[in-house]
Image (tube, helix red, strand yellow):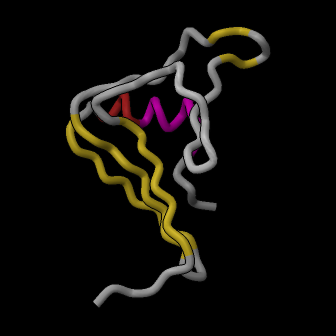
Amino acid sequence: MLKEVDRIEVLTLMDNYVDLLLESTKVVTRPPKAKGGMISADTLIGEHGLSLMVTVHDGRKSTRFFLTQGTPGSVFSTTRRTGSGTGED
């Protein structure tokens, strides 16, 4: 039986595709193309597989990583670049 929770946040850290020109929408927040008027040389990476950071809110906050394929270095590099951290306070 599934337990009822207040909210679930799913952050895609890496998938097979990256399009740095896509804009944010009402339901998707994408990293900025530039910071301080400068285009970053430190860009996001796309690799084969899917890696997610899932945060469950049910009176407390619990974060789990689901990593399939991709190299751990590039997945956590993406986490650092997006400023997402681990979600644990």
Please report the residue visible at 55 percent of the width from the left and 29 percent of the height from the top: 81
How many numbered callouts?
0
Residue 4 x %, y %: 45, 86
- Residue 70 in the magenta stretch? The answer is no
In the rendered structure, the answer to whether residue 69 lies left or right of residue 59 reads left
Residue 33 x %, y %: 62, 19
Please report the residue visible at 61 percent of the width from the left and 41 percent of the height from the top: 25
51 vs 6: above or below: above
From which residue to which does the magenta span run? Answer: 76-84
Residue 46 x %, y %: 34, 25
Q: Which quadrant holds the N terminus?
A: bottom left
Please report the residue visible at 50 percent of the width from the left and 18 percent of the height from the top: 43
28 vs 8: above or below: above
Tell me the chief SS of the magenta region: helix
Residue occupying the far bottom of the picture: 1
Residue occupying the far right of the picture: 36
Quarter assignment of residue 30? top right
Quarter assignment of residue 70? top left
Please report the residue visible at 64 percent of the width from the left and 61 percent of the height from the top: 89
The front one of 75 and 13 is: 13
The front one of 7 and 80 is: 7
In the rendered structure, the answer to whether residue 89 lies left or right of residue 14 reads right
27 vs 50: above or below: below
The front one of 10 and 80 is: 10
